[in-house]
Amino acid sequence: MPPLERARQALADGRLEDAELSARAAAEGGNRAGLLVLGEVLLRRGRHAEAARILAPRLEASPDDAELADIVARAWDGAGRADEAIAALARRLTLVPDDANAAVRLCELLLERKQAVDAGRVARAALKSHPGDARLHVIVARSRLARGRVPQALEAAQEATRLGPRYADAWLHLARIHLASGDPEAAEKALRKCIEVAPQHGDALSRLGILLVDRRQPKAAAPVLEQAVQIVPDQVTAWNALAAARHQLGDSDGALEAVDKAIALAPRNLVLLRNRSEILLDTGRCAEAVELAVETLELARQAAPEKGALDAAEEAAIRAIAADTISRYVCAGRNESEPLERELEMNFGRHGLKVPVASLGEVADGVRAPVQAALARCTAGKPPASVPPMATPASEKSPR
């Protein structure tokens, strides 16, 4: 049997090592058919970059070879080379305008690069040949949503679910659009439909869990998110939402476990670090909360993020320092207001934080719960300690 036939037979049988040996023999001297089979074998073996390196020069020499353009596009795509994949997919569509798969993948890459207008143009052109392809209607919906055309995006997404009621991603993107239009109930219904169609859809499970947390339904959210992180264990947002759900349910240890999983995936994420600090505060572990909140504040200052992120880091640090200072002060048996105010100002100043004296009462009121949790830890078995009032009532203070 000639090498080319042996390669094709081995590829069909799944004997990839034998297929590669025969395909290389068949491709000697630049034989086109042998190169095409070799490319398919390398793609099946996960060696996308190697396939692209071998076949891309041949496509440059034969730019009208549609089959070669298809393999080269898939090779570059699998190798993570978006620019080259986009160029090869565009070449494929020029040669085979009705290739819906190439159109969809090209649009997805364009959307990833925030080229929504181009993605929409390609999808609309492909719809002329494939008007019933739900995937293309989803692309149109995503393109419109990215450009802020929410009503038009909703129309396209609804058409996608009508045409492809078993196409899970149509329901997923319909949910995204409902959220963008301010309709969380409709979004929840769409997400549940997506999960009904694809029970192991990790993204849909994660989004549903996050939505339920945002709607203060932690009991419903927790099992959904626990399933999500089993399916997509590297999704930071799912772990963070699971931490929030457990926190709302009063499971501080479980919340810390979940947020620690998220931080392991994104160690310098300011939101995650602040969330961990808040969980520590609520359990009365104020000293640990201070240490983490101050580290987070320094990271925020070094990273120079947008002002809102820095303000949030400062607020978290102020809360942690206030709770720790007040609880230590009271646990030591002290109850004078003015020395406590001076100590608070000193501890804030140590970390470059400025809190007007007139706002100290408001700050103290805002950490009442974590202070009580800390006092419960240090006064176990003793009469409950009380926090001395700040010199100025909170109601008379101006906000910081």
Image (tube, grey):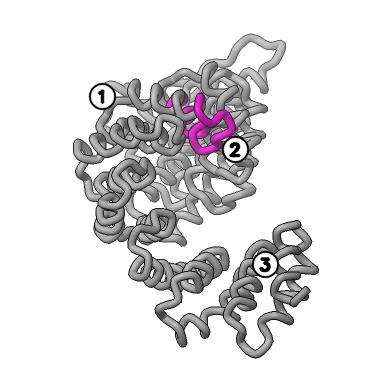
Residue ID at (67%, 21%): 377
Say which of marks 2 and 1 sits in front: 2
The residue at which mark 3 appears reads as: 41
Q: Which residues are magenta?
A: 196-213
Compared across the picture, whether 52 is left or right of 230 comes to left
The amino acid marked with disc number 3 is Val
Q: Is 227 placed above or below 310 here? A: above
Q: Looking at the rendering, which quadrant does residue 306 occupy?
A: bottom left
What secondary structure is the magenta-colored segment mainly? helix
Compared across the picture, whether 30 is left or right of 351 comes to right
Say which of marks 3 and 2 sits in front: 3
| Residue 263 spot, x, y in % from top left | 60, 46
Q: Is 215 placed above or below 108 here? A: above
| Residue 325 spot, x, y in % from top left | 54, 34
- Which quarter of the image is occupied by the N terminus? bottom right
The Cα–Cα distance between marks 3 and 1, rounded to whole angstroms, is 75 Å
Residue ID at (41%, 40%): 315
Which mark identifies residue 259?
Answer: 2
Q: Foreground residue, 119 or 339? A: 119
Question: Does residue 18 appear anywhere in the picture?
Answer: yes
Q: Foreground residue, 297 or 356? A: 297
| Residue 300 spot, x, y in % from top left | 45, 54
SS at badge 1: helix
Task: Tell me which label, 3 or 2, sits earlier in the chain.
Answer: 3
The residue at which mark 1 appears reads as: 396
SS at badge 3: helix
